Image (cartoon, helix red, strand yellow):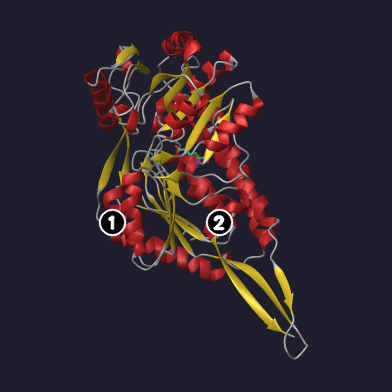
């Protein structure tokens, strides 16, 4: 059965499959609020079929396939995504409402590139070996091999759907695992489309499976299924905690990339243009729906007023509009319910005594877009550090800016969070950059940049932001089991 771009079906053992119980969900455009498709709502039966297909594909040769053959297939897959770039782009922007200009430069290229990066990584993995003496003088050799972990459940969020799905699926497949992906029911289109591409390039049936539906039912059935050997997840900390509990039954491993309440620290010796441009991106890109985004900005007092004024100017210059309008620089939030949540934080900030520097509500939009989940980019000042909007992740286009006086104070403020995913430092003083960067409790610290990363370095969160590191060879830790072979000579 072929794929209707607006009908999201399960993809199991190389075939698209509708809901067995006949249940569907509505796919709504974040841009207009109109229905743009249906999603087949998966239950335990579809999950069981997908996990069984993944198990069979593992046993039928994917796990033991000669590595160069697997690498070649993954490269072909990346090339084919690039050949069908415009279809992925259109699907991703229809689902998320993000501007084409963003998805064109970030989501789709990274989605394809993830397969290349992890295919290249796996080619160069060495095994360790030690020789040892034995009492009889003949000696022994100990060596290790890496085996795929098995069937991996990939539970994927809606903010960067293709990018984050492939960030999990690519290393899983490169290491010889098979997968069952559960995309968010807000954003199913590119994950479902990838099934078609898997078939086109000859990835064996059952290696890549998709079940679509709601997190509380389909997702829950997937992580509880005892045929799943490990679960990799990106999403909120609350959901991650529940998922970890579910994975404990059967002692399955988890990799968790979760929330953030990331700090930006701007020193008076920064390059102001770069700090403004970088903070505008880190606070407002993707309508603030990036776990690495900056929601707390600390600015050294001598430049505080100028920074606030210039960030305000930049936020007010953002152009909200339809994804395919070339002048659009910011899309809507993903759903009406997420907008309600973000707006409740906007109200909370006011209740807590914030000065609203800009934004704080719903913008006027042209009639054709009026049903979308539009929201104003928002900047606050004046809140104390124990305010709710300073403590909790909002996941919207907003930030609070506070002044600081010393390096020590900036470090203390930045680290004053239960989360520890990322931070951004803006300074032209190289010694200070390293000194402060190393003192921040965050999995990734950017200096004079944001979101930039060589995919071979470890990525993950500290504290309540996550468990595990992925990227390059660090992904081997989660996606393979090490086995030791001891050979008596
Ligand atoms: O860049 C990545 O690989 C990554 N995992 C980003 C996560 C963003 C969360 O919203």
**Residue at 48% of width from left, 9% of height from top?**
310
Q: Nearest the camera: 468 or 134?
A: 134
The quarter in which the C terminus is drawn is: bottom right
| Of callouts 2 and 1, the N-terminal one | 1
Q: Which mark is residue 105?
A: none
Q: Nearest the camera: 431 or 51?
A: 431
Q: CA distance from mark 2 to mark 1?
A: 25 Å
16 relative to 294, above or below = below
Q: Secondary structure at mark 2?
A: helix
Q: Which mark is residue 43?
A: 1
Q: Nearest the camera: 57 or 278?
A: 278
**Residue at 51% of width from left, 30% of height from top?**
103
Observer-side mark, 2 or 1, equals 2
Is residue 84 in view?
no
Q: Position of residue 109 (x, y in %)?
A: 58, 35
Q: In the rendered image, which residue does mark 2 sit on?
A: 173
Q: Image check: 375 left or right of 56?
A: left
**Residue at 48% of width from left, 39% of height from top?**
441
Q: Secondary structure at mark 1?
A: loop
Q: Position of residue 121 (x, y in %)?
A: 66, 52
């Amino acid at each position: 059965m072929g794929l209707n771009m607006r009908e999201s079906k399960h993809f199991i053992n190389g075939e698209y499959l509708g809901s067995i119980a006949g249940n569907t969900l509505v796919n709504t455009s974040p841009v207009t609020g109109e229905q743009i498709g249906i999603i087949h709502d998966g239950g335990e039966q579809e999950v069981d079929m997908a996990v069984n297909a993944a198990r069979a594909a593992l046993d039928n040769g994917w796990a033991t396939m000669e590595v160069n053959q697997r690498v070649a297939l993954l490269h072909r897959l990346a090339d084919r995504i690039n050949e069908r770039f415009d279809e992925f782009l259109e699907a991703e922007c229809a689902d998320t409402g993000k501007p084409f200009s963003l998805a064109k430069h970030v989501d789709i290229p990274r989605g394809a590139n993830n397969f290349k990066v992890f295919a290249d990584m796996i080619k160069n993995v060495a095994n360790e070996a030690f020789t040892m003496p034995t009492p009889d003088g003949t000696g022994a050799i100990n060596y290790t091999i890496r085996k795929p972990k098995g069937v991996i459940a990939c539970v994927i969020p809606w903010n960067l759907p293709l990018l984050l799905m492939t960030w999990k699926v690519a290393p899983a497949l490169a290491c010889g695992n098979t997968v069952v992906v559960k995309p968010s029911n807000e954003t199913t289109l590119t994950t479902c489309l990838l099934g078609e591409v898997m078939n086109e390039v000859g990835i064996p049936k059952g290696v890549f499976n998709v079940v679509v539906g709601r997190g509380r039912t389909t997702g829950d059935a997937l992580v509880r299924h005892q045929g799943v050997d490990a679960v990799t997840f990106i999403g909120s900390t609350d959901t991650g905690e529940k998922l970890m509990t579910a994975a404990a039954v059967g002692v399955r491993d988890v990799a968790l990339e979760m929330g953030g309440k990331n700090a930006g620290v701007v020193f008076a010796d920064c390059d102001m243009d770069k700090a403004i441009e970088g903070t505008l991106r880190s606070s407002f890109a993707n309508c603030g729906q990036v776990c690495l985004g900056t929601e707390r900005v600390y600015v050294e007092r001598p430049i505080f007023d100028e920074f606030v004024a210039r960030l305000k100017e930049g936020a007010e210059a953002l152009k909200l509009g339809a994804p395919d309008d070339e002048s659009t620089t910011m899309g809507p939030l993903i759903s009406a319910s997420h907008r309600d949540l973000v707006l409740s934080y906007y109200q909370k900030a006011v209740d807590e005594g914030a000065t609203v520097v800009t934004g704080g509500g719903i913008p006027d939009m042209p009639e054709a877009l009026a049903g979308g989940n539009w929201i104003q980019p928002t900047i606050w000042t004046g809140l104390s550090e124990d305010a709710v909007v300073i403590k909790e992740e909002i996941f919207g286009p907003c930030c609070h800016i506070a002044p600081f006086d010393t390096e020590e104070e900036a470090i203390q403020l930045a680290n004053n969070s239960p989360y520890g995913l990322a931070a951004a430092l803006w300074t032209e003083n190289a010694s200070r950059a390293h000194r402060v960067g190393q003192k921040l409790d965050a999995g990734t610290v950017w200096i004079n940049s944001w979101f930039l990363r060589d995919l071979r370095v470890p990525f993950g969160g500290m504290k309540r932001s996550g468990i595990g590191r992925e990227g390059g060879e660090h992904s081997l830790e989660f996606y393979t089991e090490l086995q030791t072979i001891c050979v008596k000579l």
